[in-house]
Image (cartoon, rainbow, N blue to C red):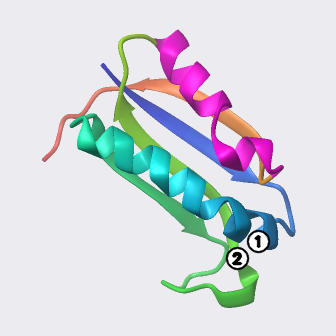
Amino acid sequence: MFYAIIARDVEGSLERRLAARPAHLERLQALKGEGRLLLAGPHPAIDAEDPGPAGFSGSLVVAEFPSLEMARAWADADPYVAAGVYAEVSVKPFKKVLP
């Protein structure tokens, strides 16, 4: 089943986000390589493709996991969590309908 991992950034965490980004992307590439990643990306803090110093307000990952517990464990092990980028992370079952 797919799960949506919805994270909210700590205010002013852009530098920590940028430092942890390579390790974060490596984990996402592993999911992609396993054919389990549906989509992933950040939420710009402003209405712009590149928010510059405004940074990001959070992230969304939708990926396939065997269970909710495994999706939560994966989310808890994210480098952004360890780096203090995320203030809050929620994990919810996700049913893909379209496209």
Residue 92 vs residue 95: left or right?
right
Q: Which residue is mark 1?
A: 14
* Residue placed most toward the observer, 4 or 78: 78
Q: Are marks 2 and 1 in contact (CB under 8 Å)?
A: yes
Specify the amino acid type for callout 1: Leu
* Residue placed most toward the observer, 90 or 34: 34
- Where residue 87 sits, quadrant-wise, is top right
- Where residue 46 sits, quadrant-wise, is bottom right
What x and y, as percent, mark residue 50? 54, 86
Of the numbered discs 2 and 1, the one sitting upstream in the chain is 1
What x and y, as percent, mark residue 21? 61, 62
Residue 81 painted magenta: yes
**Above or below, 81 relative to 72:** below
Residue under the point 83% across and 49% down = 84
Which region shows up in magenta?
68-84
Residue under the point 34% across and 50% down = 39
* Residue placed most toward the observer, 32 or 92: 32
Residue 90 vs residue 40: left or right?
right
